[in-house]
């Protein structure tokens, strides 16, 4: 529920219609002017808007606490410039303000005059304003009463319920999802809504279906079992799409649901990696699974932080990739390809990144036809190529962005620094990226030494030396993470820790499944960090339970040097898994209780 401000319009009957629509969208009170002292979001609606009920409801229920504005392609509203889903200052308008803004609580003090150029004033005062474009439905602004009948007729011509079901599908998705899932998943979404299933309930069902697929890949041992596993994996991915579609269709969003969907997606995928490794059998299969989980998690970290960097750059007064050069040219090419929706180049660009739909399709198809080992090899090959492609291009493009991805972010939390790292950061030696990069090199050298077959006292010396050398990455932790390429720091720290864990497993003959379990637990912790970043939620005390990458590396080194490598690996892995589950339950329960007060 919220409150609304309904501005003057050209016709009393239209005003009455808008008032009824605002109440249906959740407005508890409707005012003629902005009340003083509000502590809840406010819907500000122009009195000249003619739209479907769903348009107003959608703007009112956009997930997240921030400010969102309706954007129309043309009309009498103030010109606006949209980039990456945000409204930003710009000289080349991409649309006009649609006369409907939901102002978040944090941005209420930035409101200058709701009767003036509302969006421009909010942007000028530093607000982040998300854009909500109208698709399939109708929204128009009218200047005179004579224009109202034609606008209402245009609204009546569109079946709102049918349009809303199609709107539940993402506007731009990946090739496999677009042509092999979204063509029929809306029917499943509608059925789920009729059955009164919740998005979280659909997520839970998808976890069960994917777990069954992983079990069949692991223990089926026959081609019919692999075929059934491939079908179940495909259906699990369909349900993974349906949970989000159901949330959009029923407008039942929650921060917890978004967080759970993000974490569950990764957990399901990595569970399939484990099932494929069990089914393929042998140390070689587990090595493939370990490489896949480590690379894919690090790659996701770079994706998340590059997206954050790009969002910050879009809001900056200086445009991203300004000044030309390689970064500017790459940005221009990327923009042209993105704009050519549906072209061969567009789909090649999206598929080259090997997104989740393509990964799951590869595992399902290769596993069903050729078996678990080929599926693992195929998905790992795709991850390697996609990682090289995205890392190279995004690093080049980031060099031209004169902003930092860490703007407004607590760096130590997102770095996953522990108590030891925070103490070392007081020295302030070196740069953040140089320190993290050095840690990756140390981890890679330690892994090479592990494969060289060291043993005895020499191995213990190398292990402890590698752990101490890794801690060099904590020395610049307290320095400002202010450069564009610092978006790579969290991913580099993840890579260094994962390399160290894998090297311990190789050097001390830790069972491969134990190493995989620890990497799985670490991945969940790190995905939790990025999920909270995306949902604008602080980790706080929860992540102190994880000890920090620095303390985990030191404990691993000491435990291994004293002959307890397997025990230490298993203990840390199950400690992280149990505290992740327990800590998440406590965190979200407390958050829900606080929100209810």
Image: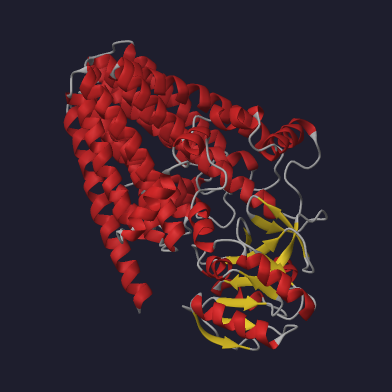
Q: Nearer the viewer, residue 379 or 59?
A: 59
Residue 319 visible in this rendered orientation of the protein: yes
Left or right placement of residue 468 versus residue 123 in this view: left
Quarter of the image where the C terminus is located: bottom left
Left or right placement of residue 386 versus residue 96 in this view: left
Where, by quadrant of the figure, is residue 463 drawn? top left
Q: Nearer the viewer, residue 199 or 136?
A: 136
Left or right placement of residue 45 versus residue 319 in this view: left
Residue 287 visible in this rendered orientation of the protein: no
Q: Nearer the viewer, residue 195 or 445?
A: 195
- Residue 425 versus residue 468 in the image, above or below: below
x then y, percent, for residue 315: 68, 55
Residue shown at the point (19%, 38%) measured from the top left: 571
Q: Nearer the viewer, residue 74 or 92?
A: 74
x then y, percent, for residue 423: 41, 49
Residue shown at the point (40%, 19%) measured from the top left: 378
- Residue 466 versus residue 26 in the image, above or below: above
Where, by quadrant of the figure, is residue 509 drawn? top left
- Residue 487 versus residue 259 in the image, above or below: above
Left or right placement of residue 366 versus residue 36 in this view: left
x then y, percent, for residue 385: 51, 22
x then y, percent, for residue 114: 70, 79
Residue shown at the point (44%, 35%) measured from the top left: 356
Residue shown at the point (77%, 80%) measured from the top left: 145
- Residue 450 versus residue 91 in the image, above or below: above
* Image coloring type: secondary structure
Number of residue marks: 0
């Amino acid at each position: 529920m919220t409150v609304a401000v309904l501005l003057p319009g050209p016709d009393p009957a239209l005003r009455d219609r808008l008032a009824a629509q605002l109440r249906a969208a959740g407005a508890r009170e409707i005012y003629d002017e902005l009340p003083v002292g509000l502590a809840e979001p406010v819907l500000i609606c122009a009195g000249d808007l003619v739209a479907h009920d769903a348009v107003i409801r959608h703007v009112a229920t956009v997930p997240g606490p921030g400010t969102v504005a309706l954007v129309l392609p043309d009309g009498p509203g103030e010109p606006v410039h949209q980039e990456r889903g945000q409204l930003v200052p710009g000289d080349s308008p991409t649309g006009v303000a649609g006369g409907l803004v939901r102002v978040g609580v944090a941005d209420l003090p930035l409101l200058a005059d709701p009767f003036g150029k509302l969006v421009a004033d909010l942007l000028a005062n530093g607000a982040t304003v998300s854009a909500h474009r109208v698709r399939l439905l109708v929204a128009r602004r009218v200047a005179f009463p004579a224009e109202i009948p034609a606008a209402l007729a245009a609204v009546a011509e569109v079946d709102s319920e049918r349009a809303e079901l199609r709107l539940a599908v993402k506007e731009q998705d990946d090739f496999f999802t677009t042509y092999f899932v979204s063509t029929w998943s809306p029917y499943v979404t509608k059925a789920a809504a009729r059955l009164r299933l919740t998005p979280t309930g659909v997520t839970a069902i998808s976890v069960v279906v994917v777990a069954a697929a992983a079990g069949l890949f692991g223990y089926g041992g026959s081609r019919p079992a692999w075929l059934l596993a491939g079908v179940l994996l495909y259906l699990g991915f369909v349900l993974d799409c349906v949970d989000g579609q159901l949330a959009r269709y029923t407008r039942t969003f929650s921060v917890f649901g978004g967080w759970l969907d993000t974490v569950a997606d990764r957990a399901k995928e990595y569970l399939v990696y484990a099932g494929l490794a069990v089914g393929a059998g042998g140390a070689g299969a587990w090595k493939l699974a370990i490489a896949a989980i480590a690379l894919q998690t690090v790659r996701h970290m770079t994706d998340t932080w590059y997206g954050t960097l790009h969002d910050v750059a879009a809001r900056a007064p200086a445009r991203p990739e300004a000044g030309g050069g390689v970064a500017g040219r790459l940005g221009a090419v990327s923009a042209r390809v993105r704009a050519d929706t549906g072209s061969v180049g567009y789909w090649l660009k999206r598929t080259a990144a090997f997104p989740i739909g393509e990964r799951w399709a590869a595992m399902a198809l290769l596993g069903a036809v050729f078996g678990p080992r080929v599926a693992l090899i195929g998905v790992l090959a795709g991850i390697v190529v996609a990682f090289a492609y995205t890392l190279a291009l995004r690093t080049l493009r980031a060099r031209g962005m004169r902003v930092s991805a860490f703007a407004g972010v607590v760096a130590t939390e997102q770095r996953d620094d522990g108590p030891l790292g925070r103490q070392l950061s007081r020295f302030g030696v070196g740069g953040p990226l140089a320190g993290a990069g050095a840690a990756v090199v140390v981890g890679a050298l330690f892994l090479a030494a592990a494969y060289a077959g060291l043993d005895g006292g020499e191995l213990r010396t190398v292990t402890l030396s590698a752990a101490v050398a890794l801690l060099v990455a904590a020395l610049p932790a307290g320095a400002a993470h202010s450069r564009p390429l610092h978006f790579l720091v969290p991913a580099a720290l993840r890579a260094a820790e994962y390399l160290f864990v894998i090297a311990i497993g190789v050097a001390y003959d830790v069972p491969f499944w134990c190493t995989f379990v620890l990497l799985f637990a670490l991945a969940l912790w790190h995905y939790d960090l990025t999920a909270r970043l995306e949902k604008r939620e602080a980790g706080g005390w929860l992540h102190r339970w994880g000890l920090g990458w620095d303390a985990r590396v030191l404990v691993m080194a000491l435990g291994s040097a004293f002959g307890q490598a397997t025990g230490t690996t298993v203990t840390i892995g199950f400690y992280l898994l149990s505290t992740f589950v327990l800590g998440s339950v406590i965190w979200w329960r407390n958050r829900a209780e606080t929100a209810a007060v």
